[in-house]
Image: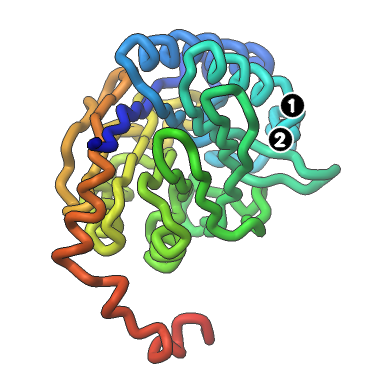
Amino acid sequence: MPRVTRAALIQASNPVPGDQSLAKIKDAMIEKHIALIAQAADKGAQVCCLQEIFYGPYFCAEQDTKWYDIAEPIPDGPTIKLMQDLAKKHAMVMVVPIYEVDMTGVYYNTAAVIDETGEFLGMYRKHHIPHCHPGFWEKFYFKPGNLGYPVFDTTFGKIGVYICYDRHFPEGARELGLNGAEIVFNPSATVAGLSEYLWKLEQPAHAVANQYYVGAINRVGTEAPWNMGEFYGQSYFADPRGKIITEGSRDKDEVVVADLDLDMIQEVRNVWQFYRDRRPESYDQIAAY
């Protein structure tokens, strides 16, 4: 019997300027996403992934300790508890990226994975932390991830997560494949003029090199008061051949849905034996530097 998973990506703009109260911003984004998650469920989605730190603006455009106050523990914080309730209500696996506080003064850029019963399965912490472009001051906010590249075995497929800047590093994408991922989600926040030329190049390349599905998510709109550029949306799914099979708009809130034939992974791997033909014993320099 074919294994087909209907999966959804949610891209959304931030309706409240970043100079407003943190509570106002966070509440508005959570309310917006509750409605969009319901839309995903209405479309029959069995798995749904939100954008990077979905409940706020991309605050890394500035360096200000006030943003530490929107971080929450995982899984015991209120947002993940709410998402567990929604996952159970909609019988939908949820991938929920938030700002995580692990202990006082230690913060991560993290995605929680919740199964369709509302059970917390685990989390992925972003590994690669940029601090190299004006407006992307992430080392001020995030410690590099320390949980490896976990893959979560769900009713609707084996799910891995890679977050935003991670996508520029093929090593972690391969680790996810070696760990058995069938669908890898990459929630992001990235602007035109910086990365758009890579957006439809790198992640389909990960999909074809590792022969799994990739769900790439980017938020939309501009975010005041920084106005650092346009978040250009265009969230999409790429199949194990690297083909983009569905794509969102560049400028509006949207639920992007695709049916993912997980049996295609075996079909493609029967043709392209990349895992058989790997030569890890010869890749000395990759881990040496």
**Mark 2, secondary structure of its residue:** loop
Residue 51, horizontal then vertical, whole percent: 45, 32
Kind of residue sitting beneath label 1: Gly
Structure colour scheme: rainbow
Separation of marks 2 and 1 at Cα, in angstroms: 6 Å
Rendered residue at 30%/14% (across/down):
43
Q: Is residue 19 visible?
A: no
Position of 182 relative to 259 (above/below): below
The residue singled out by tag 1 in the image is: 77
Q: Residue at x 59, y 36 (%)?
A: 112
**Mark 2 surroundings within 10 Å by alpha-carbon count, few (fewer than 14), some (14 through 19), many (20 or more):** many
* Drawn side of residue 286 relative to residue 246, left or right: right
* Residue 48 visible from this viewpoint: yes
Q: Residues within 10 Å of mark 1 (few under 14, many from 20)?
A: few
**Residue 74: mark in rendering:** 2
Q: Amino acid at mark 2?
A: Ile
- Is residue 181 positioned above or below 236 on the image? below
Residue 40 pos. (x, y %): 37, 16
Q: Nearer the viewer, residue 208 or 14?
A: 208
Residue at 27% of width from left, 33% of height from top?
4
Residue 160 is situated, as x and y percent measured from the top left of the image, at 46, 48
Seen in the picture, residue 203 relative to 155 is either above or below; the reply is: below
Q: Nearer the viewer, residue 260 or 72?
A: 260
Which residue sits at x=50%, y=44%?
153
Viewer-proximal residue among 164 and 118: 118
> Looking at the figure, which quarter contains the N terminus?
top left
Q: Quadrant of residue 67?
A: top right
